[in-house]
Amino acid sequence: MLDPGIFRAYDIRGIYGHNLNADVAYRIGRAFVSFVGCRRVVVGRDMRPHSKPLFDALSRGLTDQGADVVDLGLCSTPMSYFANGLLGADGGIMITASHNTAEWNGLKLSRASAVPISGDTGIDDIRDIVMSDRFARRGARRGTVTSHDIAPEYAAMVRSHAEPVGERGGPLRVAADFANAMGVVEARALEGILDIDPLYDELDGSFPNHEANPLKAEAMADLQAMVRGGGHDLGIAFDGDADRVGFVDERGGIVPNDMTAALIGSAILAKNPGGRVLYDLRSSWAVRESIEEAGGKAGISRVGHAFIKRQMRDEDAVFASELSGHYYFRENLYCESSALAAVLVANMVRREGKPLSELIAPFRRYHASGEINSTVADLDAVFERLLRAFPDGRQHTLDGLSVEYDDWWFNVRPSNTEPLVRLNLEARTRREMERRRDEVLGIIRG
C-alpha cells in the first residue's frame, strides 16, 4: 500500500523497507518524467546503503518513461544542483534523507537549472500520478544511463572564489566534522585551499558517531573539542547531504548561522556593490543591518529552500541564507554550496588577519532565544491569542506571524509535519529577551 505521507512540502522522504522501497522509487521515476516532461535527468545519491537500490529502481522508472539518466554517483546535494545546470539537464533528483537517521531515505526533485519542485509546484502532482498509476503514455524509445563525475568541475567553481594564500602564510588550518556523510565529497573542492584535519571522514550511512545535523549542539561537541585541542583557525561541520554547514570559531565556540550569514553577505557585497541579499525572517536584526551597512539591498524571505530560491531568481539576489545553515549563491544556480560558504569565511579570516571570533563579534548585537518548539492542539487559537496580545506591534504574516517592536521582535510559525509551533525571538538585552520569551511562550501554551 502506497503511503501518500512520504510526499512532503519540500521533498519525498520515508523509511526504507516500510513506506519507501524500490517499487515506490520506480513509480516516482515514471511519474517524474510524466509530470516534468523531461528527457535528461541528473541523479545523485548519498552514502546510505539503500541509496544505490533506490537509484537502480528510480533510473528504471525514468528510462522506461523515455528519459536519459546521467548518473552522478556519490555526491553532495549542492554538487547535484551544479550538475543540473552545467550539463544542461531538464530535471534533477538527489537521493538522500539529509540529516535523518539511518533508516530514512528520500528524494529531492528539481526542474532544469535546479529550480526546486516543492509541494505546491509539483510534488503533490507527482504524488497523485504515483497513487493513481496515471503515467504519461510511453514512447517507443527507452532512455539510457550514462555516468558523469561532476567533482572536478564543481571544485573549479568553488576554487575560483578562493583568494591567493601565498602572501598570507599558506592555507588556514581547519577542523572538519563530516559525520560520516557527504561532506566528505563536498569538501574535496577545498583541497589546496584549506589545510583540513578530518573528523569522521569514512562514509557510513549508519551514522556511527553522531547525527549529521550541525543545528544540534550535541552534534557539534566533538568538533568543538577538536578545535579546542589547539592550532585550528576554525571548525566546519556538514549535515548529511552537505547542503547545510555550521562553523566553530578558533576558541571552539559555535557561531550562530545568522552571524555567519552577516559575515558572508558583507564579503559578497564587497565584490557586488549594491547587490540584493536575502535572509529568512528568523534571522537577527544584525543580518539586515550588516547588509545595509555594506551597501547592499536587504530583503526578507520565507523559511524553506523552494521559497528562497524562487525569490532569489525573481530579484536576482547575489546571496541568501537561512538560520538553519543553508547558504545560497547566485554562482550555484541560486542554490546551496557549503564548500563555497567555507571558502568565503576563510577568505575573510585570512584577508583581515583576525580570528573568526573577532570577525563575528560586531554582529553579536542582540540576544536571541533560539528556536523553541511547543506542541499545540489548536493552531488557529494560538495565532488568535497572539494577534490580540500584541495589537500595537508591527505585524506581518509572510510566514506564520511576525511581530516587531523597537526593542524586540518574534516570529511564530507552524510546523509543516507536526502539531507544533516554532518560536524565534530577539531583543536588545538578555533580560528583555528572557522576559518576552516567557511572555510569548505563556500565550502559545495557553
Image (cartoon, rainbow, N blue to C red):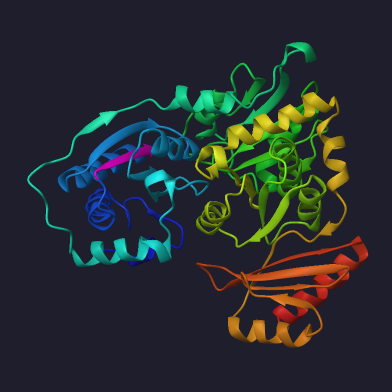
Determine the image quadrant of residue 338: top right
Residue 96 in view (yes/no): no
Q: Residue at x 25, y 29 (%)?
A: 146
Task: Identify the residue at horizontal 90%, vertical 68% (top origin).
Answer: 432
Q: Give the residues drawn in magenta, as a range.
A: 39-45
Q: Is 230 placed left or right of 12 in the picture?
A: right
Provide the major secondary structure of the magenta segment.
Answer: strand
Q: Is residue 40 magenta?
A: yes
Asked whether 18 or 422 is in front, the reply is: 422
Measured from the top left, where is residue 21 in percent x and y? 29, 51
Q: Give whichever of 78, 415 is nearer the camera.
A: 78
**Measuring 84% from the left and 30% from the top, which residue is drawn there?**
355
Measured from the top left, where is residue 411 in percent x and y?
A: 71, 69
The image shows residue 213 at horizontal and vertical percentages of: 60, 45
Along the horizontal axis of the image, is 160 left or right of 148? right
Rendered location of residue 172, percent (x, y):
73, 21
